[in-house]
Amino acid sequence: MKSLTAFFEGTRHVYLREIKLRDPQPNEIQARTLYNGICMAEVWKYTGVHHNEPILPGHEGIGIVAKVGSDVAGVKEGDLVTTTTWGEYVNIPVGRFLPIHPNPNYELKTHLVEPVSCVVTAADELNIYPGDSVILFGAGYMGLLLVQLLSRYPLARLVVADIKKQNLELAGLYGATELIDSSTEAGRARLEELESEPFEIAFECAGVQSCFSSCERLLGKGGKLGVYAWHHGQRSFDGHLWHTKGLSLLNVNHWLVCKKEYLNPWIGADRLMSQGKIEQSRLITHEYNFTDIERAMEESTARSGNFIKSILRF
């Protein structure tokens, strides 16, 4: 069969091409894609990396099983599953997809499992302890998913800092105990005050040097910094603070550091959304037809106005 599929090639060049898709192998399923998220990793690949050869973007999909390989158990045609690349149909091996159980109170397009699996791993990697104080910089899409998860821990406080009022309001709705607009003089003054009330854990979700530096100042002795944003390029740190406080830095990119089976965090993510404990209906602000992919990528790159998260509809 043929499947219309997206490719990146060169810089800021995305195009669609029909490819011939074989029947699934014995250990594969074939799924028809329904929705797929546009991750900021895709935006970076689109804008910041030159690809001499075509590459397949996409990893946040939702689809419906169309065919099942002879050796595949536990899934059947018509089941909903996670999917991979931006194509109308995709073949996926066992161990790389998960049957999903969307909450009936939310639209299917909001059940993006892969991003939530990342926040499950992020929280797990820092070994959060009851009574910890946590500060999070960057209430974007991933930061707001993380706020929802962290708010369910028995924390002493969960402070969130960002420069967008609408995002801070969502963080408050999701359970943050204090909101700081770090773009204002009052917000910056409050962050200075908090240096005398150190935190056990900080999450850097903004991807900028200033937030990284704020984290190291706000952490107390033995504090842990989870770098959750993708920092492109070099960053500096205050060696005196890191030495005298005994700080730890953890890269919470789950592709690199997850010590569990590949799909374990996905199972937790699916359960959290199925039970309504993490929701994305307020976070998905932009939706595009798959065939309008050039506009989707340009507007996802610009991230203007109320933008938080964009998805493709197939």
Image: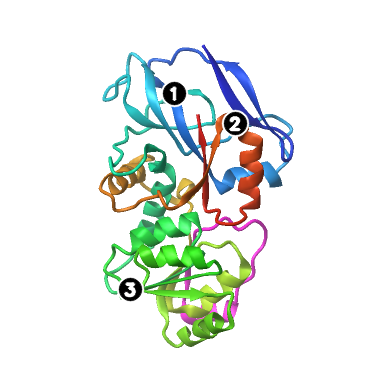
Q: Position of residue 124 (x, y in %)?
A: 35, 57
Q: Residue at x 32, y 19 (%)?
A: 77
Q: How many labels were placed on the picture?
A: 3
In this image, 237 relative to 175: left or right? right
What residue is pinned by disc 1?
Answer: 32
In this image, 29 relative to 89: left or right? left
Give the spatial CA distance, label 2 vs label 3.
Answer: 41 Å
Residue 27 can be seen in this image: no
Q: Dot 3: few (<14), some (14–19), or many (≥20) neighbours within 10 Å?
A: some
Determine the secondary structure under disc 2: loop
- Identified by mark 1, the residue type is Arg
Tell me if label 2 and label 1 are in contact, CB under 8 Å.
no
Stretch of the chain drawn in magenta: 227-249
Give the spatial CA distance, label 1 vs label 3.
Answer: 44 Å
Q: Position of residue 231 (x, y in %)?
A: 60, 58
Q: Nearer the viewer, residue 161 or 131?
A: 161
In this image, 108 relative to 168: left or right? left
Residue 56 image label: 2
Give the image's coloring scheme. rainbow
Q: Residue at x 58, y 61 (%)?
A: 207
- Identified by mark 2, the residue type is Leu
Residue 11 magenta: no
Residue 246 against residue 226 in the figure, above or below:
below
Q: Nearer the viewer, residue 96 or 84?
A: 84
Residue 132 image label: 3
